[in-house]
Amino acid sequence: MGLFDERIEKAKTICILGHQTPDGDCIGSTLAIYNYIKNKYGDTKVVKPYLDEFSEKYLILPNADKISNDLKDATVFDLAIVVDCSNVERLKDFKRYFEEAKDSIVFDHHENNDIPAKVSVVYPDSIATCEMLYPFFDKAFIDENVAICLYLGLATDSGVFRYNSTNRRTFLMAAELIDYGFDFTKLLDTIVFENSLSQRKAQGIAFGRLKLICKGKVSFSYLTQSDLDELNIKKKDIDNIIVYLREMENIKIAAFAYPVGVDTYKFSLRSKYDILNVAEFAKDHEGGGHILAAGCLYHGKIETIEKIFEKDMAEFIERKESSK
Ligand SMILES: [Mn+2]
């Protein structure tokens, strides 16, 4: 029995936690583990997945309705399993469940993971947390419900098998998973490609403001809180805008800013080149992430922040390009 099953075996109550504003890999990992434990142990274990609010489109995943955002559970869990999250602060208020738990294990592929879990399984070379998890599962208990969740994380974190981090292992795993027979076309249409009318309108506003900065090397746009209010759209519904900003010719980095508090903007960053490690940029601005995808914070009015960001980013690119 592997280290994962061993720890589950010993626990009667288990919580599963992931990073704030959970994405496909985070939700996929959470539910893959939930469904796996249910398959293997039935109702002999109490398993509670807790995540921040996420888009309803994820309800296509089996048992997504079991994920709770309740912060008042009095259970002190025997085991906390943390997925796809590099820092306890990114667990937001759910970190209490982690800190109180008697045992803990973290599965993550972010660089610089510093979660003080009893067992840390961190593979920065892995394309997705779902990819890392797969070999830890006892194959006898993987079914369609586990496979579809793992597939989602693998597909979303690889940009649907397009990012240059995609490799032979990614496709081999995808091939094994689709043999379980779920509808992967419907899955990706629902979660990745289809948009609501207000999402399209938000994209319209962001595209209207789109500009090239840093001598054409960076595509940049933003949405404000009043944009979100007017369209009655939530932050979780605008997380794909950065994807479109990245899909532009001749740029090296894409940046998209959106409000995360009063006069505080989160900048989502995507790089097209390894030498422009946006995680390194983000680390200097209250953020973090991966080489090609990261996020950071700026405080102030967007008109001011935009100029400061452009200056910081221009310096960063200059420094990196001159030292290569
Ligand atoms: Mn991930």
Image: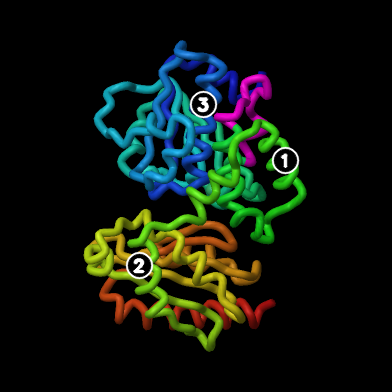
State the SS at label 2. Answer: helix
Are discs 1 and 3 less than 8 Å apart at CB? no
Quickly name the residue at label 2. Answer: 202
Three-letter code for the amino acid on which mark 1 is drawn: Ala
Q: Is residue 217 above or below residue 125?
A: below
The residues bearing labels 1 and 2 have C-alpha atoms spaced at a distance of 35 Å
Instruction: Find out whether residue 233 is within the magenta segment.
Output: no
Residue in view at x 57 percent, y 36 percent: 148
Tell me, for residue 139, which label it has, or none. Answer: none
Q: Where is residue 238 in the image (x, y as percent from the top left)?
A: 39, 61
Name the side, left or right, on which 156 lies relative to 181: left
Q: Which residue is drawn at 42% across and 45% down?
A: 57
Q: Mark 3 points at which residue?
A: 35
Residue 5 sits above or below residue 291 on the image: above
Per the image, the residue denoted by label 1 is 175
Q: Nearer the viewer, mark 1 or mark 3?
A: 1
Q: Which amino acid does label 2 sit on?
A: Ala
- What are the residue bounds of the magenta stretch? 131-146
- Measuring 53% from the left and 62% from the top, which residue is drawn there? 279
Q: Which of 177 and 139 is in front in this view?
A: 177
Farthest top residue in view = 44
Give the image location of residue 222, x and y in percent: 37, 72
In this rendering, would 231 be left or right of 190?
left
Q: In this view, does 296 lie above or below 61?
A: below
User: Is residue 118 among the parts visible in the rendering?
Assistant: no
Gap in angstroms between the C-alphas marked 2 and 3: 35 Å
